[in-house]
Image: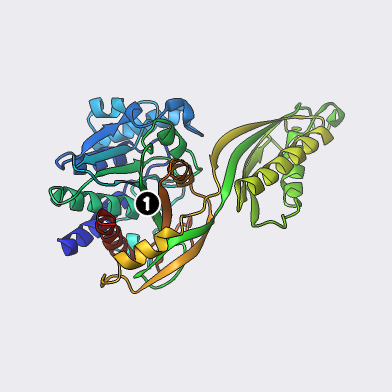
Amino acid sequence: MLKELKHFAVQTRRKFHTFPEVGFTEFITTFEIYQMLQNLSFHLYIGKEIMDSDERFGVPKVEEIEASKARAIAYGVPEAFAEKLDGGHTGVIAVLDTGRKGPHIAMRYDIDGLPIIESDEAGHVPADKGFQSQHPKEMHACGHDGHISIGLAVAKYLDKHKDELTGKFTMIFQPAEEGLRGANSIVQKGWLDNVDYFMSGHLGIHALQAGSVAATAEQILASTKFDVTFKGKSAHAGVEPNEGRNALNAAATALLQLQAIPRHRDGTTRINVGHLSGGSGRNVIADKAVMMAETRGETTALNQYMYQEAERIIQASAAMYNVKASISFMGQGLGSVCDAEWVAIVKDACKNNPDVTKVFDMLPLQASEDASYMMDHVQKSGGIATYMIFPSPLPVGHHHPQFDIDEAAIRTAVSVYIDVINYLQHR
């Protein structure tokens, strides 16, 4: 059966790759996951059942959500199903309770894509093999299509072996991981309460031969995502420039000065401005500018240091040009540390796994993950949590129009999750 599941996971990944959807607009993705799970022995939950609406971060504009809903209905998603996801309440949680005493194991698989135009150049495997994105300006450029398929394969395994298993299994197909926007709302709804073991992970990250796995990750960076709107006063750039207050100048000054924040002695820190726009014409003093930015830190405290410095510089830059700056919070992740016990668990569980060529104790993520909210909640409640990494040769880095993974890494991940689940049954 394991061979069939690994083949299923690869084919399923290709299917989901064709219709990527950005966070909180995953109507088609949610429907397809639900369809694949509904004939299995899980209780399925969608919509407002799975998340606290008010605890979501960075929810898109109503028009964007509605456009994705309409696209999903045109795709074939029943209108009644789409309405259950109204307002961007996407994602699926599947629960299998065996009714027999045993551990509560929770797993998180993220499902969203990115606002990236996928490459159609020769040599890009999804383009060559005909499973590239069919959604303009959206792409699975980070491997979440693979994560979905891994989760569905594991679900099929659990269903097949439900009479032999003990305890409870909660499988979280989470929306809006990109931008660190979706996990907190699921935690606040109570789905991670009383969990003994929590697992999540990521394909790629390290360009190593497929077949290896890191039992734990380090440098899961805390992060804050935020937008800044600078508001000034427009004026004729030739006739009366003195009457204007240039919002674009303030934003540009802030962009440059943010890069000057001193890095901290206590650990890794990051800052990035990924978008800057403003103004309306060459002869008009710009009265508005918008910036999209983020900070990161190896710990939550280090990220807070970066964010506080960023906030100070933004307000100082605005004051320099006599404009107003308003900062909108868009998403956040915590700094997380995996429980060391997972090293022995994964190594023991996979010692006879032919798909696993090497188990690393730890590899650095050096990125942010809102699974950190789930990890933190489980750990504070007495459970243990890990974030695994499944390396793959990478033709380019993550979040690139030509991103792709070696599908052997998907097969490795499926077998690792299954081996670990079986090991935890008897621990």
Query: Which quadrant of the structure image shows residue 332?
Result: top right
Instruction: Say few, some or many: other residues with alpha carbon within 10 Å of mark 1 (under 14 / 14 to 19 / 20 or more).
Output: many
Which residue is at 47% across, 26% downward? 54
Which amino acid type corresponds to the residue marked 1 in the rendered image? Met
Viewport quadrant of the N terminus = bottom left
Which residue is at 50% across, 42% downward? 180
Q: Secondary structure at mark 1?
A: strand
Say above or below: 298 vs 275: below
Figure colour scheme: rainbow
Q: Residue 203 or 19: which is nearer the viewer?
A: 203
- Residue 249 visible at all: no
Q: Position of residue 183 (x, y in %)?
A: 44, 39
Say above or below: 108 vs 324: below
Query: Which quadrant of the structure image shows residue 226?
Result: top right
Q: Position of residue 237 (x, y in %)?
A: 80, 33
Which residue is at 45% across, 69% downward? 207
Viewport quadrant of the C terminus = bottom left
Q: Position of residue 373 (x, y in %)?
A: 48, 42
- Residue 6 visible at all: yes
Q: Position of residue 133 (x, y in %)?
A: 35, 51
Q: Residue 267 or 343: which is nearer the viewer?
A: 343
Say above or below: 214 vs 284: below
Please give the count of numbered marks on the rendered protein. 1
Which residue is at 39% across, 40% downward? 175
Q: What residue did someone put label 1 on?
A: 199
* Residue farthest along the right direction in this orientation: 242
